[in-house]
Amino acid sequence: MQEDTRDVGVKASAAAIGALAGTAVAGPVGGIVSAAVTPILEPLMMKVFEEFSSDSRESATGVLVEAAEHAGTGPTEFAEQVRRGEMQRLVGGAAFAAGARTRNKDKIRGLGRALADGILAEDTAKLDETHLILRAMDDLEAPHIAVLNYLANFWPPTLAAGGTVVREPAPLNAADHAERAWRGRPRWTVQQVIAAREGFADAVPSLLGTLQRHGLASAEQDLKKMLDDYDKATKKAQSATSRSSQTPKFDTTKLEDRWAATGFAHRVLAYLLAEGVAVSPADAQ
């Protein structure tokens, strides 16, 4: 941030806080309080800005250090690798900017590891993919990562009719991962995600929307199951001897969105999770 811009921001922030303090006291006394508080706040706000800038530089540097360590080289040597081409500089800039905007250590490590793999690759397509990975990571914080970890690495909980958890989320084992082609991917409803992490209840739609926007999660509806169940119910009704048998109705509850992690999500999580190991999102916080 340029000095003049920072100074304006400091003064404006201090003045605004001072004004808010004044609103707590009615009449002329409120104005006096505001005028008295603002000069006191200016040096405090200046210190906040300086520390914020320092924290951001430290986080961006952390990305470089992690990348160099992952690449098996020193930070100076790796920085030269980042500077060697236009695309490398673009990818490096995306990683360092994302690092400056977070204080999440796992995310900083993941940004560095992804950057190293992209910079060391000679394939332009790999650099393009790295750019997408870094852009996705930039938007992810701890709640997004926790939800994505559930979608990718856990079978959803079993819920009773009232939403009570009957069976907790279960991690996929080695066989599940190896046999996913025919076992199918874990698919979670919004209610199952909320049941797993109640603290995210109001934010779950937004969290899933962010994951979907970056191609990390997809929503699908089990139309085939609904039609199969309807066909079975129809045949059962037709074979019934009772005149009271009613024509079955479509069970539209089976059309509820079910969320699943994409293949791209697994590549991103491999960088974000410590040593690439899935841990319970509830335990990771």
Image (cartoon, rainbow, N blue to C red):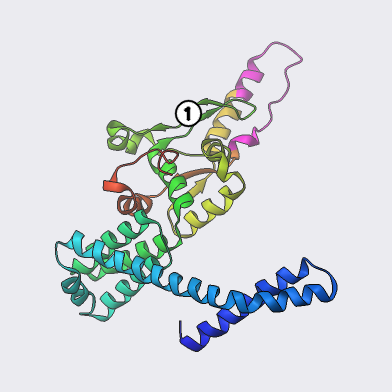
Magenta region, residue range: 233-254
Q: Residues within 10 Å of mark 1 (few under 14, many from 20)?
A: some
Report whether 18 appears left or right of 97: right
Decide if residue 2 is on the left or right side of residue 57: right
Front position in the image: 173 or 220: 173
Residue at screen point 53% across, 33% down: 225
User: Is residue 256 shown in magenta?
Assistant: no
> From what the image shows, is residue 156 above or below residue 43?
above
Instruction: Note whether 13 is above or below 135 in the view shown.
Output: below
Q: Quadrant of residue 100?
A: bottom left
Does residue 121 appear in this view?
A: no
Name the quarter where the C terminus is drawn. Answer: top left
Res. 36 image quadrant: bottom right
State the residue at coordinates (68%, 73%): 18
Label 1 residue SS:
loop
Residue projecting furthest to the bottom: 4
Using the image as rendered, state which of residue 118 and residue 182 is in the foreground: 118
